[in-house]
Amino acid sequence: MHVENVEINGFKIDKFNQYDLEPGATQGKCPVCSHNRQPKNQSAKCASYDWGRGIGTCHNCNSTFQLHTYQRRGERSKEYSAPETVSPPVGEKAAAWFEARGISISTLVDMQVSEGIEFMPQTGKEENTIQFNYFMGGQLVNIKYRDGRKHFKLFKGAEKVFYNIDNTIGYDDIVIVEGEMDALALWEAGIKYVVSVPNGATLNNNNLDYLDNCIDYFLDKKRIIIAVDNDGPGDMLRQELVRRLGAEACFIVEWGDVKDANEYLLAQGKDALKRVVLDAKPVPLENVVTMRQIEGEVIDFVENGFKPGYQIGLDNFDDIFSTYTGQFITVTGIPSSGKSDFVDQMAVGYNMKYGWKIAYASPENVPTYLHAHKIMRKLWEGMPDKSEVHSEKWKSIVSNVNDNYFWIDMERYSLESVLKKGAELVKRKGIKCLVIDPFNKVRDIDSHTDDVNKYTMEYLTKIEMFCKKYDVLVIVVAHPTKMYKTQSGEMEEPTMYNIKGGGEWYDASYHGLLVHRDYDRKLVKVKVLKVKFQNLGENGAECWFSWDYASGLYVPHIEQTFVGEKMPWE
C-alpha cells in the first residue's frame, strides 16, 4: 500500500505498514522474532505498535522496528552518480570474518551488507570486497568498498550521506559513529537508530558535506549521541559535530580504555555496549553552569570551607597571599626593583610545591640561556661553578628545568600568538602557569582602539578567558608609568593605578602585587595591592626579603614583616 502525502515527523511515508501488521492495533506479532519462536508462541502478541511515531517495540527480543518505509527528506543540492544494484550477500568466509568481530549474519542481512569484485585504486587491480550499501529514502545512493588489506573507496561521483540514515526516522535519539563496523556493532546491541560518517575523521579540517545532505534527519531528535573513536581524529570530529549540531542537543559516549563501538562490543558484550551508549553524558553548555556540575564543589565547601589557595613556599609571603588557578596576577614595580626575579621565585615555588609546569613569554628576559641560568641558580641554591658542569647535580637540575620550564620564543610577540602557544603547551606539556613579562612587549595586535582604557580591558579579558578555559594561572608583569621621588628623596611606590591603562588594571585583575626595593636597607618589599577573595590574602599586607646574589633566592626577613600600615612593634 502506498500512502500519498501522509507524513510522520515530517517524513512522507513510502510504504505504509511494511510488515503487514494489523493496522491500528496497539499490540501484535514481532516481525523480527515471532517467526523464529516455538509454534505455540508464534501468534503471541509480544510487540507494541506506536502508529503515531511509526515505531514498534518487541518485549520478547527487545528490538525496535519501523512500521513504514519513508521517502527521502530534503532535496539533493546537485546531480550525483549512483550505483545501480546491490551485490549478493556475503559468503561464508566473509561471514566468519564478521562473526569474529561480534557481528551476526542477521545483522548483515538487516543492514544489507554485500560482497563482490571491485577495482581498488590502492592496489591497481580488482579485489574481492565487502560492500556497505548506503540508502536514503529507500534508494541506493552510495557504496563503501573495503578489501582485505583495509583499503576503502566510495562509489565515484555518488552523494555522501550517513550510513543507515533511513533507519533513524521515528526515533527520538540518533547515534553517530565513525565507521560502518561500529554501526553494525550498535545494531547488534539493539540500537538501530545509528549512523556512520562515510569518510572517517582526520586531525585536520573535517569536511561534513554529508551532514549538509542529511541535516533534515536531525531536526526532530531529542538527543544526538556522538560515539566516535577515542583518538585524536575522533576528538576533532566530535568537536565539529557539536559545533554544527549544537551543544544543547549533543551527548558524548566515553569509551574508556577501548577505541570504538566494535572494540567495546568484543570486550564487554552487547548489553554493556547498549548501556554505555544510552548513558551518554550531555555536552556542557558553554558559559552555563548547572548545579549538578558543581555539586561536588558545593559539598566540599560545606564540609571543609574555602579551598586553600596555592602558595610558593616562603612563609612570610604565604601568610599574606595565595591564589587559585583560572585567575591572573598583575605584578608591578619600578625598573630594577626585582619584580621579574620575584616572579621567577613564585614560579619555582609553584613547581616545587605542586609540580606545576611553567611557560614564559618574556621578550625582555633574553638571551634565553641567561634566564634558564637564573632558574637553575634558584634550584641549585647557589652559583654553579664551571667545575660542576656535567656533575650529577648539574644533570639533575638541567633535567628538572628541561621538563618543567618552557620559553615561548618568537620574532614578533603578540597576545594572540602567545595565548595560542600557551594553549598548545597546556595540551602537550600540561603547563599550569604562564608568565607574560612585560605586557607592553606582548601587544594585542587584533585590538584597533585608540582608547588605552578600552585596550587594557580587552587585553585583560582575553587573558581571563584563557585562564578559565585551560585552568591556568597567568602572571602579568606590568611596568608603571614614570614615578617621582617624594620630598624626603625616596622613590614613590607605584600602585596598580600607575600602570598605563589606569583603573582597568585594578578593576580587572584578580590579584595585584608590588615588588619594591629599599636600596638603603638592601631589602625587597612585596606588598599585596589587591586580592579578590578574602580567604586568599589581605589587601595592604606586606612582607620583606633579603636577596641572595649567588642563588637569586629571596630570603624572608621575618622581623620586618608587617600587615597594613603598622609595624609589629608599633
Image (cartoon, rainbow, N blue to C red):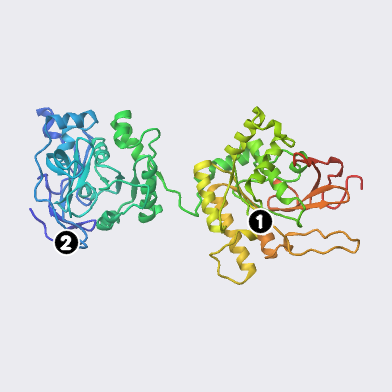
Task: Find numbered disc 1 in the image and state the secondary structure of the residue it sits on.
Answer: loop
Category of crowding for the residue at label 2, using alpha-carbon neighbours closer than 10 angstroms: few (below 14), some (14–19), many (at least 20)? few
Q: Is residue 317 above or below residue 272?
A: below
Question: Which of these two is toward me, 266 or 288?
Answer: 266
Q: Is residue 182 left or right of residue 433?
A: left
- Residue located 32% across and 46% down the image: 201
Q: Which amino acid does label 1 sit on?
A: Pro
Tell me how far mark 1 sits from mark 2, CA to CA.
58 Å
Give the residue at mark 1. Answer: 438
Q: In this view, does 464 lie to the left or right of 139?
A: right
Q: What residue type is labelled 2?
A: Glu
Image coords of residue 140 (percent x, y): 14, 50
Q: Nearer the viewer, mark 1 or mark 2?
A: 1
Question: Which of these two is toward me, 321 or 355?
Answer: 355
Image coords of residue 457 (percent x, y): 61, 63
Image coords of residue 486 (percent x, y): 87, 63
Category of crowding for the residue at label 1, using alpha-carbon neighbours closer than 10 angstroms: few (below 14), some (14–19), many (at least 20)? many
Could you say which disc has been placed on residue 79 in the image? Answer: 2
Q: Which residue lies furthest to the bottom in this view?
A: 450
- Earlier in the chain: of badge 1 and badge 2, it is 2
Residue 308: tell me if it is visible.
no
Q: Is residue 105 left or right of residue 444?
A: left
Q: Is residue 38 above or below residue 53?
A: above
Task: Find numbered disc 2 in the image and state the secondary structure of the residue it sits on.
Answer: loop
Could you say which disc has been placed on residue 357 in the image? Answer: none
Image coords of residue 146 (percent x, y): 20, 40
Q: Which residue lies furthest to the front in this view?
A: 387
